[in-house]
Image: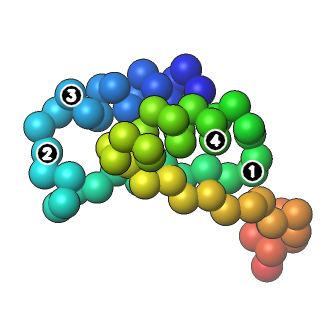
């Protein structure tokens, strides 16, 4: 969570039009602390969207095809 917070702070310092350049945080796997930090600091404040997708347990086999 600390690295993402630092990265987001850096991104948010740059001038941008959020309607033209929305920030999307993509999270794979499940990390409760990361999810809570993203929701509290960026989603609820309207600064970013949060996309979560579960990791496919067969990813290694699929990528080998």
Q: Position of 15 compared to 55: left or right?
A: left
| Contact flag, marks 3 and 1 (Cβ < 8 Å) | no
Gap between marks 2 and 3 measured at Cα: 9 Å
- Under tag 2, what secondary structure? loop
Instruction: Check disc 1 and report the residue beneath it.
Output: 29
Residue 51 percent across, percent down from the top left: 54, 59
Gap between marks 4 and 1 measured at Cα: 10 Å
Instruction: Check disc 4 and report the residue beneath it.
Output: 35
- Under tag 3, what secondary structure? helix
4 or 1: tag closer to the N-terminus:
1
Q: Residues within 10 Å of mark 2 (few under 14, many from 20)?
A: few
The image shows residue 6, relative to residue 12, as above or below, that is above
4 or 2: tag closer to the N-terminus:
2
Gap between marks 4 and 2 measured at Cα: 25 Å
Gap between marks 3 and 1 measured at Cα: 28 Å
- Under tag 4, what secondary structure? helix
Q: Determine which quarter of the picture holds residue 20.
A: bottom left
Residue at point 44%, 44% (across, down): 44
The image shows residue 47, relative to residue 11, as above or below, that is below
Instruction: Check disc 2 and report the residue beneath it.
Output: 16
- Under tag 1, what secondary structure? loop
Q: Residues within 10 Å of mark 4 (few under 14, many from 20)?
A: some
| Contact flag, marks 4 and 1 (Cβ < 8 Å) | no
Mark whose residue sits in front, 4 or 1: 4
Considering depth in this image, is 44 or 63 the residue closer to the camera? 44
Q: Residues within 10 Å of mark 1 (few under 14, many from 20)?
A: few
Q: Position of 50 compared to 17: left or right?
A: right
């Amino acid at each position: 969570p600390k690295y993402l917070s630092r990265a987001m702070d850096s991104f948010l310092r740059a001038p941008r039009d959020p309607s033209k350049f929305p920030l999307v945080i993509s999270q794979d796997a499940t990390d409760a602390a990361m999810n809570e930090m993203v929701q509290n600091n960026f989603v609820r404040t309207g600064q970013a969207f949060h996309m979560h997708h579960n990791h496919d347990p067969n990813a290694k086999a699929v990528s080998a095809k």
